[in-house]
Image (cartoon, grey):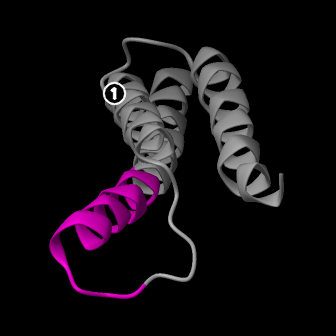
């Protein structure tokens, strides 16, 4: 019974991590595409290094979510890796334009 509950928790948290990182990556991929291949006049454009960094971090988070769903890592390790990385990149992405 405990094994089933543990596997269910892993799958739910893994899916949440996966969804958050897919949305994160999709947002930055769309911005990269929008900057380079559309005729939209942007008020502010992020530098390409921020876009690429955020896409790479999102892909790492997707890999963490998949590994958690497949029970290759534990919940605590996945959260300890994913949350601080997203916070640091979030602060880098949204605080960078202020300076």
Name the image quarter holding residue 91. top right
9 and 15: which one is in front?
Answer: 15
Residue at position x 41%, y 34% in the image: 65
Where is residue 4 shown, x and y percent of the image? Answer: 45, 31
Residue at position x 45%, y 37% in the image: 49
Where is residue 80 shown, x and y percent of the image? Answer: 70, 21
Magenta segment boundaries in residue numbering: 22-41
Number of residues whose C-alpha sits closer than 10 Å to that of mark 1, classed few (under 14), some (14–19) or many (20 or more): some
Where is residue 64 shown, x and y percent of the image? Answer: 42, 26
Against 75, is 12 above or below? below
Against 22, is 92 above or below? above
7 and 23: which one is in front?
Answer: 23
Residue pointed to by mark 1: 63
* Residue at the right extreme of this rendering: 99
Q: Magenta: predominant secondary structure element? A: helix
Q: Is residue 17 toward the left or the right of residue 55 in the image? A: right
Against 64, is 94 above or below? below
* Residue at the left extreme of this rendering: 37
Where is residue 87 shown, x and y percent of the image? Answer: 73, 40
Residue at position x 71%, y 42% in the image: 92
């Amino acid at each position: 019974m405990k094994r089933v509950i543990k596997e269910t928790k892993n799958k739910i948290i893994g899916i949440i991590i996966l969804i958050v990182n897919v949305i994160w990556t999709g947002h930055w991929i769309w911005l990269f595409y929008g900057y380079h291949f559309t005729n939209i006049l942007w008020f502010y454009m992020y530098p390409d290094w921020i876009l690429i960094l955020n896409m790479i971090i999102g892909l790492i988070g997707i890999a963490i979510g998949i590994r958690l769903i497949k029970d290759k890592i534990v919940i605590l390790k996945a959260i300890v890796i994913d949350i601080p990385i997203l916070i640091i990149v979030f602060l880098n992405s949204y605080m960078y334009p202020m300076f």
